[in-house]
Amino acid sequence: MQSVRTPLPGVGSLHVLHLHDGQRIGVIRHHDHRREVVVYDPADAGTRLTSTLLTAVEAQVLAGLVESDGPQVHSARLERVSADLTVVQVMISAESSWLRRPVGDIAVDGAVIAAVIRDERVLPADPRPQCEPGDVLVIVGRPDAALKVLDVLLAG
């Protein structure tokens, strides 16, 4: 695999990976810490098929999924219910620094942990259950606030 870094003045840098099968994918690292994933057309190296801008949290979750050891937050699923409401489901891994800590310690204005799914049971977030490996935390709130809860979980 070959990796090529190209400075993008005023933006950041582009890192393009040339994969074993001829595909090319890129990551634009913006100066403001945003990450953009780019997929190129294999028939035309200069043509983007698609790209998507990731938040810092989304980039961390993606990086964790690619790492061989996996992330502290095992997996996350984001659903946008409306422009003002987002539901995020986050599975806590056995390596998470949040194990045995009450979910009530995770507080962000504009979002709440509405429930904990454990062994196919739905536990109310109040009283405050402690995080266990495999728990799925259901976060409901404004999109920006729900993603801040992910930030808190990833920061430990």
Image (cartoon, grey):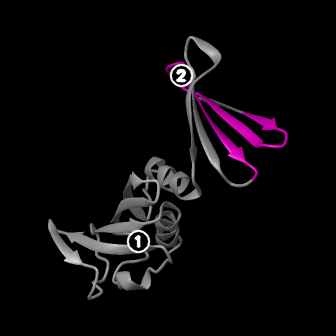
Graded by Cα atoms within 10 Å as few (under 14), some (14 to 19) or many (20 or more), the crowding at tag 2 reads some
Extreme top residue here? 43
Horizontally, is 122 left or right of 41 in the view?
A: left
Graded by Cα atoms within 10 Å as few (under 14), some (14 to 19) or many (20 or more), the crowding at tag 1 reads many
Residue at figure coordinates x 40%, y 77% from the top left: 98
Q: Which mark is residue 26?
A: none
Residue 15 magenta: yes
Q: Amino acid at mark 2?
A: Gln
Extreme right residue here? 9
Q: Quadrant of residue 3?
A: top right
Residue at figure coordinates x 36%, y 74% from the top left: 113
According to the picture, the residue beneath numbered tag 2 turns out to be 23
Residue 137 to residue 64: above or below: below
Give x and y (percent) for residue 35: 63, 47
Q: Report helix, strand or loop for mark 1.
A: loop
According to the picture, the residue beneath numbered tag 1 turns out to be 96
Depth order, front residue of 17/135: 135
- Asked if disc 2 and disc 1 are in contact, CB closer than 8 Å, the reply is no
Q: Report helix, strand or loop for mark 2.
A: loop
Residue at figure coordinates x 51%, y 53% from the top left: 58
| Chief SS of the magenta region | strand
Depth order, front residue of 25/35: 35
Q: Quadrant of residue 53?
A: top right
Nearer-N-terminus badge (2/1): 2
The residue range painted magenta reads: 5-31
Horizontally, is 41 left or right of 129 in the view?
A: right
Residue 18 magenta: yes
Q: Amino acid at mark 1?
A: Ser
Give x and y (percent) for residue 34: 65, 51
